[in-house]
Amino acid sequence: MPARELELDLEAFEGPFDLLLALVLRDELDLAEVDVAGVVLAFMERLAERDELDLDACGEFLVLVAALLELKARALLAGEAADLEDLDPAAAAEELAQRLAEYRRIKEAAAWLAERLEAERERYFRLGPAPLAPAPERRLEQQDPAALAAALRALAAEPPALSLAHLELRFPPVERFLSRFRALLLRRSRFDFDSEVDGMTRLEQAVAFLALLELRKGGEIELSQAAPFAPIRIQRNAAAKPERREAWNARSA
Amino acid sequence: MERPLRLVAANPLDRLARTLEALLVVASQPLSVAELAEATGDDAERVETALGLLSERFHEGRSGIVLEKVAAGWAFRASRDAAEACGRLFERPVERGLSAAALETLAVIAYLGPCSRPEIARLRGVAADSVVAGLVERGLIAEAGRDQSVGAVRYRVTPLFERVFGLESLSELPRLDDLGSEAEEIRDRLESLAEARPA
C-alpha cells in the first residue's frame, strides 16, 4: 500500500493523500486547516489493518509527512521563520514539489520496467562474448623498388671515419723540462717552481711537475713547501750532483 | 525433387538470406543492418529485404528460434513456446533478483543517462554505489565517460539491457511526461472532486 494512495477523510480535505499534497503545493489548499495528526492517524489505522509491516510505504510516508509538517510550520510561523532559514517558503514548496514529481516519475518508470521484465520472462537468447573480429588487412600503397634499393644503398655505404682529434692530449716530453731544470740548477742553487712555470698551460705545468718529481727521485734536488698551496721551493742537492760531476769529468778527461 | 531445389539455390536473395541466417547464428549479440551488409558485401536495402524473408520463416509459432529486431539490430532468440524447457536447462542470471532499487536506478540511467552516481543518488535520495556496481556486474549498464565539471564516472544502459527488456531501442521506453503526467491527472481529479463537493 503506497502511502500516496492513502484515502483521507479529514475536515478540510477528502481524497487520496497525494492529491492533498499536490493541492497544498499548489497553494490551492491552506495547510493551516489540514489536520496533519489526522493524516498520521489514518495511516496508522491502515497499517494496523495489515499484518505485514511495509517498510517502503512507511519510509515514504515519513518523508511526505515530514515535508508536510515543515511546510505547515513555515506557514504558521510566517513572521518568525525568517531567522530559521533564508529559504523562501514558496521556493521551498516549489522545490519539494519538483522533487516529488521527479521521484514519482522515476518510480513509475521503474514500475514500467518491472512490468516489462515480467512480460519478457520467456525471453531466452544466447549470451556471451562476441567472437573476435578478424584482424583488419593492412593495405599498403604500391611502392617503387628503385626507392627501396636507393634506401638500402645509402645504408650499405661505408660511413666516414670519425676524427678523434679533439679527444687527444698532447703531452710535451718530460725530458724537455728535465734538461731545462738541470740547466737552471747549474746557474742557481734554488728557485721557485711557480715562477718558472708561470705562463705555461696546465698540461705543461703538470709535465713540469712530473720532471721535478723525477729529479727528486734521482736525488738531484730537494723540494720544500711551507704550507699547502704555498710556493714550491726547489733546492739543488749539494750531496749529489751527477750531472755536474759528469760534465767536470768529461772536461777533465 | 531436383527442380525446386535448384530454384531455391538460383534465387540470389534467398542465398543472401541463408548467409544472414548463418551470421546471426554465429553472433552472440544483435547485428545491425550495416554490419550484416558489410559482412555479406551486399547493400543494406537487399539485406533488409532478406531479413524480412527470414523473419517470416523464423516466426513465433512457426519455428523454435525466432528472429527479432532488438537493441538496434537483429538477433535470434528462443520461441516463447520453448521458454519452459529452456528454463529447466538454463538460468537467466542477468535479470534474476533485480531489486526495486536496481530497477529504479536502471530507470534513471535509461531515461536520463549517461548520468553519474551522485546524480542518481540525488534523484533517488539514497546512495547508489552498490546498486550501480551490481548493475555493471550484470552488464546492464556500462561506464560512459566522465562528468565534465565534477569528473564523476557516468553510466549508460547497454545493448544487453535493451535485449533483456525486449526493446528495439531506448525510444521504445514510454515518455517520462506520460508516466508522471500528474499535473493533468491532478487537475482532472481536482475538477471531478470540485464537482462532487457541495458548494
Image: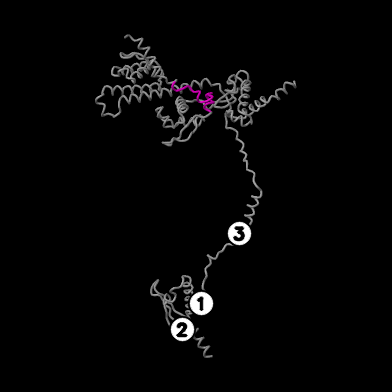
- Distance, label 2 to label 1, CA atoms, is 16 Å
Image quadrant in which you'd find residue B52: top right
The residue beneath circle 1 is: A176
The residue beneath circle 2 is: A186
- Distance, label 2 to label 3, CA atoms, is 56 Å
**Chain containing the residue with disc 3:** A
Q: Which region is colored magenta?
A: B160-177
Q: Does A103 sit above or below residue A136?
A: above
Is A236 or B68 nearer to us in this picture? B68
Q: Position of residue B121 (x, y in %)?
A: 41, 30
Image quadrant in which you'd find residue B34: top right
Whether residue A218 sits left or right of residue A228 in the image: it is: right
Q: Position of residue B3 (x, y in %)?
A: 74, 21
The residue beneath circle 3 is: A159
Q: Is residue B170 magenta?
A: yes
Q: Residue furthest bottom?
A: A252
